[in-house]
Amino acid sequence: MSLTAYSADDTPSEHTDLTLTPLRRVSRDDLAGDAVRTARGLLGTLIVRHDGSQRLVARIVETEAYAGPTDRASHARAGRTPRTAVMFGPPGHAYVYLIYGMHHCLNVVCGPDSEAAAVLIRAVEPVSGLTRMRERRGQGAGPAARLAAGPARTCQALGIDRTLSGLDLVSDERLWLALDPAAPSAAPDIVSGRRIGVDYAGPGWADRPWRFGLARSAALSKPFTLSR
């Protein structure tokens, strides 16, 4: 799958405005592939968040794939629970969870219905609504590229929390995925490496290179040590 061909080679523009631009939504079929394929394909895709008063837009630059119950690093490894039930549903829904009792993380459910695969959104670049994102992050200055360079920062900047878990990213107006109208035709330059913070998964799972990023983006959460 290739939802987009965007390749980030500079910092995000603070003057780009997609506030009112019609955007083409990502379809459920686009998200029905396996987690690794979807994680790569989501790079360059836009996240659109309407917070009740303003549309915020950010470009996905880093993702991690989680393959479902067989993946020892996945929340689905313990089977269906009240928290993970959304992962076992059809693709295209948001799975939002809390870490350390304070930070939210956004995942896109993918794969066939009941497979429980998901893609963690690890970092995004602000595209539109930068002022609001700075307010949410409590940062009035600093590089725009670092504003949402991490899964918790992404959710804070976009105002995403557990109240949005289970939301349909294909049809809802509060949070959805869109194709980038400015994406160039060239194939994206993607790097890959080990997932972060999953050493508990043990050999064979902790070291899988299922973290993906746009190679030249300044918004990556951490450097990649294993490329392509």
Image (spheres, grey):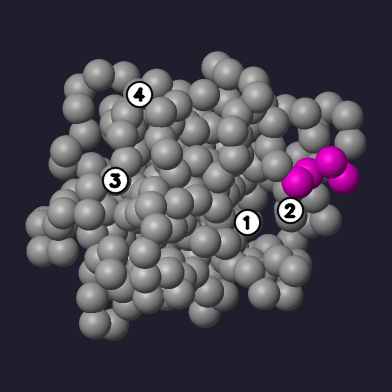
Q: Residue at the location (42% across, 39% down)?
A: 218
Task: Work out whether residue 225 or residue 159 is closer to the camera in this orientation and state it.
Answer: 225
- Residue 142 at x, y percent in the picture: 39, 58
Q: Is residue 124 left or right of residue 64?
A: left
Q: Is residue 59 left or right of residue 139?
A: left
Residue designated by label 3:
12
The residues bearing labels 3 and 1 have C-alpha atoms spaced at a distance of 35 Å
Q: Earlier in the sequence, mark 4 or mark 1?
A: 1
Task: Work out whether residue 217 or residue 115 is closer to the camera in this orientation and state it.
Answer: 217
Confirm or deny contact between disc 2 and disc 1 (CB under 8 A).
yes
Task: Work out whether residue 98 or residue 226 is closer to the camera in this orientation and state it.
Answer: 226
Q: Residue at the location (56% across, 75% down)?
A: 162
Residue furthest out toward the left: 21
Residue designated by label 1:
88
User: Nearer the observer, disc 2 or disc 4?
Assistant: 4
Residue type, mark 1 in image: Phe
Q: Earlier in the sequence, mark 3 or mark 2?
A: 3
Residue designated by label 4:
188
Mark 2 surroundings within 10 Å by alpha-carbon count, few (fewer than 14), some (14 through 19), many (20 or more)? many
Q: Earlier in the sequence, mark 2 or mark 4?
A: 2
> In this picture, which residue range is highlighted in magenta?
197-201
- Residue 72 vs 107, above or below: the answer is above
**200 falls in the magenta region:** yes
Q: Secondary structure at mark 1?
A: helix
Residue designated by label 2:
76
Q: Earlier in the sequence, mark 2 or mark 1?
A: 2
Q: Secondary structure at mark 2?
A: helix
